[in-house]
Image (spheres, helix red, strand yellow):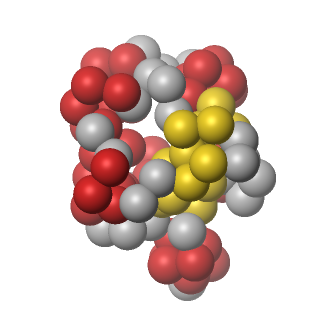
C-alpha cells in the first residue's frame, strides 16, 4: 500500500464526497483519480451515488463520474489500512 492510498483510506472511515476528500488531501483531480480507480479495482472502496445509494461494482464508472461519487472504505480496505 502506498502512502497516498493509506492517507485516502484514513479519510474514508466515514462516507465522504469527492470534493471534500480532494480538499482534505489537497490533491488535484489528476493526482486523485488514478489512485481512486486503482483502489476500486482492489475492492478497497465503496462508491455511492447519493449518501444512501451504494453503487454495485458494475455500475461504477470511475473514469467519468469520479467527481460525483461519495466514497467509503470497504471491509477489505479497512483491513489493508490497519495491517
Q: Is 16 in front, or is 51?
A: 51
The image shows residue 6, relative to residue 17, as above or below, that is below
Q: Does residue 20 appear to the left or right of 64 in the view shown?
A: right
Q: Residue shown at 30%/38% (left/top)?
A: 62
- Residue 2 occupies which quadrant of the picture? bottom left
In this rendering, is residue 26 above or below 2? above
**Across the whole image, how many numbered discs are drawn on residues?**
0
Residue 17 sits above or below residue 60 on the image: above
Residue at image coords 42%, 16%: 28
Q: Is residue 28 visible?
A: yes
Position of residue 78 relative to residue 49, above or below, is: below
- Percent across and percent down for residue 23 are 63, 19
Work out which residue is located at the far right of the displayed protein and give it. 14
Residue under the point 45% across and 46% down:
4
Please tell me in which quadrant of the rendered image residue 22 appears: top right
Position of the N terminus, as image quadrant, is bottom left
Q: Nearer the viewer, residue 5 or 33?
A: 33
For the residue pair 82 and 68, the one nearer the viewer reads as 68
Residue 74 found in image quarter: bottom right
Q: Position of residue 63 (x, y in %)?
A: 23, 31
Left or right: residue 39 versus residue 7 is left
Q: Quadrant of the C terminus?
A: bottom right
Quick check: can you spot residue 35?
no
Q: In percent of the image, x 56 and y 45: which residue is there?
A: 48
Amino acid at each position: 500500500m502506498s502512502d497516498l492510498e493509506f492517507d485516502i483510506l484514513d479519510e474514508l472511515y466515514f462516507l465522504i464526497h469527492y470534493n471534500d476528500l480532494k480538499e482534505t488531501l489537497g490533491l488535484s483531480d489528476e493526482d486523485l483519480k488514478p489512485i481512486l480507480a486503482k483502489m476500486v479495482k482492489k475492492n478497497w472502496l465503496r462508491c455511492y451515488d447519493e449518501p444512501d445509494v451504494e453503487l454495485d461494482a458494475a455500475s461504477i464508472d470511475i473514469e467519468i463520474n469520479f467527481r460525483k461519487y461519495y466514497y467509503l472504505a470497504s471491509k477489505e480496505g479497512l483491513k489493508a489500512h490497519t495491517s
